[in-house]
Image (cartoon, rainbow, N blue to C red):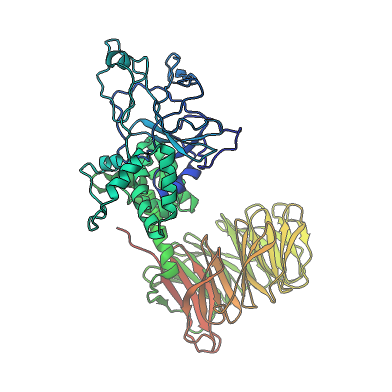
Amino acid sequence: MTVQPALPSQAGQPSCAAALPCALSCRTLLPAAVGRGWLCRVELVQVVAEEEDVSGPWELESAGKRNVESGLEANGSQGQEEQEPVSSTACGEPEEEEETEEEEGSCCSEEGEDGSNIYFYYTIGERWIDYLQRTEDSGFLRHVRPKMKRKSENGLDGRALSPGKKLCKGSEYSRTLGPCMPSPTTTFGDLRNAKAGQARRRRIPSVAPPPELQDWLRTFQRWSGPEKLLALDELIDRCEPSQIKYMMQVIEPQFQRDFISLLPKELALYVLSFLEPRDLLRAAQTCRYWRVLAEDNLLWREKCREEGIEEPLNLRKRRLLSPGFMYSPWKFAFMRQHKIDMNWRSGELKAPKVLKGHDDHVITCLQFCGNRIVSGSDDNTLKVWSAVTGECVQTLVGHTGGVWSSQMRDSIVISGSTDRTLKVWNADTGECVHTLYGHTSTVRCMHLHGNRVVSGSRDATLRLWDIETGQCLHVLMGHVAAVRCVQYDGHKVVSGAYDYTVKVWDPESESCTHTLQGHTNRVYSLQFDGTHIVSGSLDTSIRVWDVESGNCLHTLMGHQSLTSGMELRDNILVSGNADSTVKIWDIKTGQCLQTLQGPSKHQSAVTCLQFSSKFVVTSSDDGTVKLWDLKTGEFVRNLVALESGGSGGVVWRIRASNTKLVCAVGSRNGTEETKLLVLDFDVDLK
């Protein structure tokens, strides 16, 4: 059942009456419950109470409710209103006709019932239902409490009647004790005192009561319910805002309900699942039981999945947080990732590890996986580094020309060189496992998938190799100029070349299935997700293609120069350009979502970029590495700023993991020493 707002219904169009189930509409209920207390209000059409044979006495609600003058008015000439029978067959019991009886002596007896809106406040722990009815014509509230017909074979039920209840006509109580008499009205002060559990304490002890106060109160007590409401309405109009605020401070706490603790655990967890992690952590501070719920492992597993967080292997065993509390490993993983994100965003930038080893040569390619870093240089070597210690663990020597492309998986490294060969290396031992011959010019690009790698060369061909055997499996010919970029998903090969075209290949048949034409200059960058191809060109445009049909879906315009680097994930494309800007695109719509610019933008060409679900990291010829917010496009901060930036210092390449950032820096004029910088954003949660 959907929780309805507390607004009057249109006359003649009442809402459907229903009992309040435990599984409330959580999206509607929870925000109001968290912000305003635990008060659930649902609109009803008529006052119908279902009998419930409870095992204990009916008690006044401990937290209290607003009690406007009790009673149901008489309906015309009839002394009581016959109520609709309520079926209890849903609970497995035979149907019985029950009736509720109007309270006599109601001060609201002259108010009509047509067009009334009835609200009830449902309390599970105390097991009673309080109805409030607002009449449409006069706006008065009436307090209605359902009567329960007790049945006892031995006469009187031994359970005591709670305060504020009266005997129903025809009941065993009535026949034994005499005719029904209206019970004393329970006032709001009674409820406040009951909640306090002690004698009433005045909230303003320092002010002496005026001598006319008691006379004024006695006069107020003599008035009827509608007259009291009218007087209160006039009194409120004459109050100052500070006095109204005081009344709210007194009244509002009486209507707060901890409905989460009253629900079954499964439903309470379902309600809490709609909270954001930040609110869930705050809810855990409410009370002990809420903390138990907020540590639920499955609850946090869903939060981690929403954030794309995988549970670390070393957290599979749950551990005791404190007596009675079992710490959720999924929550631990979520909290760890949150702290890592905060370290990226605003944590103290510790001095980076500095890895030196390529002298003054240019670092042309960079790979980073796990705790292993591999850098390739035009000094004909590759170096393998430990990201933990910063030590150079291996130097891969064998190429006779500069290394311009590389790929890595686990301990396998593949490199391409100006010596026209590819080499397969064991990073652990430094051994060259295979040398792959076939290309007749520089191997400028490659892409590894599984045990196969596709290489593109300035000889205008592509070759597919098996890195375990070192065999050339297929040769793809069709480009008429140097192949500059390539992508491979295990089924299709996509290549971009200096002949202004992008080609889609079936490597098994060595056939070109599509030639994508449209660019008017060299193609320098490619991304391929199995469905879409994205190509960046020197003509300043970025084109999105459908791999099956070969059609151009979108032409992304906005950059002013060469698109040197791109990254695509989940239909979000981030492109870096020589015009010093970075743009974020939605390739489904072709819309530019953000342009990363402004006062803190790069001052020179963007050389490399990488992005995650929250951040974009970019490097530039201006000697800086900048962090941006992916969703808002706002500049967060500089992660690296070389002192020689602007005078020759360059950040050539960057590679990032969840906790580390590796930057290849240097210069073309000797102002900055060639080196790798390793920044660590990890946390140590114990």
- Comparing 348 with 88, the one in front is 88
Q: Position of residue 582 (x, y in %)?
A: 61, 71
Task: State whether residue 651 is above or below residue 460.
Answer: below
- Residue furthest out toward the left: 199
Q: Nearer the viewer, residue 365 or 330?
A: 330
Q: Which of 108/349 is in front?
A: 108
Q: Is residue 554 above or below residue 677?
A: above
Q: Is residue 398 visible?
A: no
Q: Nearer the viewer, residue 91 or 229?
A: 229
- Residue at 56% x, 55% y is 451
Classify residue 354 by image quadrant.
bottom left
Q: Residue at x 37, y 74 (%)?
A: 350
Q: Describe residue 579's horizontal placement relative to residue 272 as left or right.
A: right
- Residue 671 percent coordinates (x, y): 50, 89
> In which quadrant is the C terminus drawn?
bottom left
Q: Residue at x 35, y 21 (%)?
A: 53
Residue 674, can we see it? Answer: yes
Would you place residue 572 above or below residue 301 in this image?
Answer: below
* Residue at 44% over, 61% down: 370
List x then y, in percent, for residue 349: 40, 74
Residue 497: x and y in percent read 72, 69
